[in-house]
């Protein structure tokens, strides 16, 4: 296996779609620029081996598993970490809203 085949542009796009990640988010997780991700996925140029490895590590760290045939799949977050990632801002916002709504609901008392 050639080191440049650690990850193909198609695999990266498919894995990013499974995670519902933008190129910006993948770039942040891989500690690379969005331009590197964009050029890699569009086939404009081949990035350095360490950049491809960083992209793959970021995807695998988020729960992506690459099958023997190379197709990516997503391991459920609950199985991997026991719950959602605490760093997910949108999820935390939704949880706070749910908690506020639960506190704001009137409590029914069934007293005889």
Image (cartoon, helix red, strand yellow):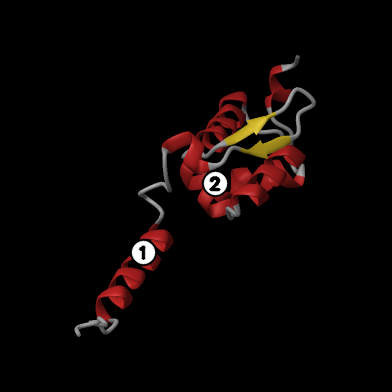
- Locate the N terminus and report the quarter of the image it occupies: top right
Label number found at residue 95: 1
How far apart marks 2 and 1 lie (CA) works out to 24 Å
For residue 64, which quarter of the picture? top right
Circle nearer the N terminus (2, 1): 2
Disc number lying in front (2 or 1): 1
Of residues 2 and 10, the one nearer the viewer is: 10
Q: Position of residue 88 (x, y in %)?
A: 41, 54
Q: Secondary structure at mark 2?
A: helix
Asked if residue 103 is positioned above or below residue 86 in the image, the reply reads below
Label 1: few (<14), some or many (≥20) within 10 Å? few
73 with respect to 96 (left or right):
right
Label 1: which secondary element: helix
Q: Please name the residue that numbered disc 2 is placed on.
A: 26
Farthest top residue? 1
Quadrant including the C terminus? bottom left
Residue located at (36% from left, 70% from top): 98
**Residue 45 at least partly seen:** no
- Position above or below: 48 against 74: above
Q: Are marks 2 and 1 in contact (CB under 8 Å)?
A: no
Position of residue 37 measured from the top left corner of the image (x, y, whole percent):
62, 45
Q: Which mark is residue 71?
A: none
Which is more toward the observer, 26 or 20? 20
């Amino acid at each position: 296996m050639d080191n440049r085949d650690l990850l193909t542009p198609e695999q990266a796009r498919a894995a990013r779609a499974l995670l519902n990640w933008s190129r910006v988010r993948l770039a942040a997780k891989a500690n690379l620029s969005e331009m590197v991700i964009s050029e890699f996925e569009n086939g404009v140029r081949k990035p350095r081996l360490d950049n491809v490895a960083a992209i793959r590590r970021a995807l695998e760290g988020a729960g992506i598993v690459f099958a023997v045939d190379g197709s990516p799949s997503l391991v459920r977050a609950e199985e991997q970490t026991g719950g959602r990632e605490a760093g997910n801002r949108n999820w935390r916002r939704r949880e706070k809203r749910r908690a506020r709504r639960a506190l704001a609901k009137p409590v029914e008392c069934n007293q005889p």
